[in-house]
Image (tube, grey):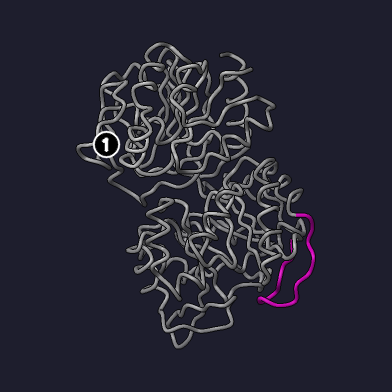
Amino acid sequence: MSGLIVLDYGGGNLKSVTNILDKLGYAYNLTDKKEDILESDRIILPGQGHFAQFMESLNSKGLTEALIHKINFGTPFLGICLGIQVLFEESEEAPGVKGLGIFPGKVVKFTEGKVPQIGWNELKITTNNTVLTNDYVYFVNSYHVIPENKQIISAFSNYYIDFVASIEYKNIFAFQFHPEKSGEVGFEFFRRWIEKN
Amino acid sequence: MLAKRIIPCLDVKDGQTVKGVNFLNLRHAGDPVSLSARYSEEGADEIVFLDITATNEGRDTMRNVVEKVAKQVFIPLTVGGGIRTIDDIRKILLSGADKASLNTAAVKNPEIIQKASQIYGSQCIVIAIDAKKENNEWFVYINAGTKKTEWKVLDWVKEVEKLGAGEILLTSMDADGTQNGFDIELTRAVSLNTNLPVIASGGAGADMEHFSDIFEQGAADAALAASIFHFDTVKINDLKNFLYNKGVPTRLK
């Protein structure tokens, strides 16, 4: 099971992701090295924090191009929370800062209700979904993505408006919620994702 | 629609769960790791640990507890009690907590809210407030409810929101330990006065309407309780079915 990396971008809570991998008994490499990214055969990008700091951290460690290359090359990729947002071109959280730009589109802030949204919200999956069901999952977010290509959306959820909860496109799975904090639903997802890839 | 959260709270002293009545009379309620796993299975939406140990050795024990729980239980974990510095926050997050809850330290040194939220993000900084009513005003108490401060609760809530707090854990000292129901008046006043999610705490008893009342009338985003869950007075899955049937947005397992 070698070749699974969890990208350590220098912030946020990686432990909850690695705890799940430990419990499932899967080996992984927690790394911030470019060579490890290039040699990896599966990538998990957990994310919490600020869009600008996140991109700055990737840029300063020289990881950005390697990551874009691997994702576009077809390496199974799982992005979580900020890890879905940075796949897009830009975010209202950090005007002028370029995201990875894997997908055309942008990241915008919730304009209604208490922000951040904190808690369990219900998924409404689309037909473009092979891994999720209409369960409650755990969200902590102030921002959400707006993809130009609506075909990549794999689930919505509702917080005053319908927002994109997950996307699925070829090798790419990315979630606005935290599967590593979503109890059994999340646990099962990790198991399936790893066994499938 | 975002679900209302049910949060069991574990008061932990020297690695064991205890529960006080009116902040006194501690009695043992069991091993925090197995209790957490049980609560998660029954549908708890989150777990709060309150470290009521006073010593440094106790703090290390608490971190070990969190570390063990985080390896078994994959729902959000919040830790409070004795967290005074940025380094304390860092350590507790590293041990696997998702949020750190500050009380006395935030009142004594409000800058820590700003610093901590800049470093770790607002979402992991919870401000715990112990509130008590006097002459028609709620005041903030610190040092585990033993010391009154000058802060009025509604002003303090505004202040912590401005400084970058992510959530309010609001304990009514008047209701705590009574099991006569949450403090609806206090919770509603705070919740309508802030853009932060509010966790209501103190007063939950055997009557499950205490919970539907605090959500429907008290405008709480989450409700926290300890002894009624520890001693099986109320089972979390029964409570959630009750809330669901009452039309409260609820996550069922």
Q: Quadrant of residue A135?
A: top right
**Of the pair B184 and A57, the residue shown nearer to us:** A57
Residue displayed at 41% across by 51% down? B121
**Residue B30 lies within the magenta run:** yes
Of the pair B137 and A61, the residue shown nearer to us: A61
Residue sitting farthest toward the bottom: B135
Quarter of the image containing the C terminus of chain B? top right
Mark 1 belongs to chain: A
**Residue A20 shown in magenta:** no
Using the image, determine if residue B236 lies above or below residue A148: below
In percent of width and height, residue B95 lies at 61, 49
Between A166 and A10, which is closer to the camera in this rendering? A10
Q: Where residue A18 sits in the image (x, y, percent)?
A: 59, 34
Identify the secondary structure beneath mark 1.
Answer: strand
Q: Position of residue B142 (x, y in %)?
A: 53, 77
Q: Amino acid at mark 1?
A: Ser
Q: Position of residue B78 (x, y in %)?
A: 57, 54
Range drawn in magenta: B17-31
